[in-house]
Amino acid sequence: LKSKNASDVLQFAVRNDGYISVGAAETADYDGSITIGTLSGFVHNLTHNTCVGYKSFGGENCDSSATTFQSLTTGYRNTSFGAKNMCNLSTGYSNATLGDEAGEYISTGFQNTALGKSAYQFPRAGKNNVTAVGNAALQNYKGSFSTAVGSFALVDDTSGIADAFGYLAGAIC
């Protein structure tokens, strides 16, 4: 398929192993995964992952202008909807993000949920069981086993296990 600009080509692929790709990505080794969006799923070894949005699962650095990334190695059953989500994902599994830059730098963590723009954006590697709901909720959080609901809830908390509910709840201002 071609756009109005003759140099832009939209790639679309459906394979018999359940992999669907829409966008301009060089891809390989997919097993039951879906990628939609330019530079979405720009990694190898996707196993039962779904990524939708510009640079979702984009590889090593969402801010890079490079066009070849390969960060995901054994991560599986991750779901991402939004631009620049889970860019550094390598071995993380069962993570879910919705919203631009939600869970942007999740790499090895598992069972994390980020809903909202920039929610749980800069987690420390290997952190698990975190739920962030709201714009920038748990944005710079470094712990595990925590829940924050509300815009900017626990936005800069680095103390570890904590729960907060409401706008700016527990935020360090």
Image (cartoon, grey):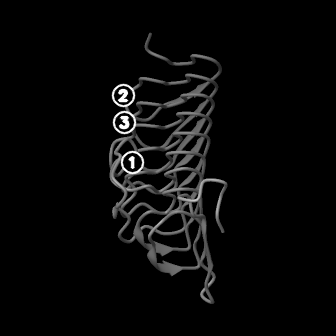
**Residue in the picture at 67% in, 54% down:** 4
Question: Label 1's element?
Answer: loop
The mark nearer the N terminus, 1 or 3, is 1
As measured in the structure, the alpha-carbon distance from the residue carrying label 1 to the one carrying label 3 is 7 Å
Report which quarter residue 38 is drawn in: bottom right
Which image quadrant: the N terminus? bottom right
Q: Is residue 75 above or below residue 99?
A: below
Give how far across and how far down residue 111 sits, in percent.
52, 56
Query: 10 Å neighbourhood of mark 1: few (<14), some, or many (≥20)?
Result: many
Outermost residue toward the front? 6
| Residue type at numbered disc 1 | Lys
The mark nearer the N terminus, 2 or 3, is 3
Which residue in the structure is indicated by mark 1? 127
**Residue in the picture at 50% in, 78% down:** 30
As measured in the structure, the alpha-carbon distance from the residue carrying label 2 to the one carrying label 3 is 7 Å
Which residue in the structure is indicated by mark 3? 142
| Residue type at numbered disc 2 | Ser
Query: 10 Å neighbourhood of mark 3: few (<14), some, or many (≥20)?
Result: some
Proximity of marks 1 and 3: CB atoms separated by less than 8 Å? yes
Proximity of marks 2 and 3: CB atoms separated by less than 8 Å? no
As measured in the structure, the alpha-carbon distance from the residue carrying label 1 to the one carrying label 2 is 13 Å
Give how far across and how far down residue 171 sits, in percent.
49, 17
158 or 92: nearer the viewer: 92
**Residue in the picture at 58% in, 59% down:** 6
Which residue in the structure is indicated by mark 2? 159
| Residue type at numbered disc 3 | Lys
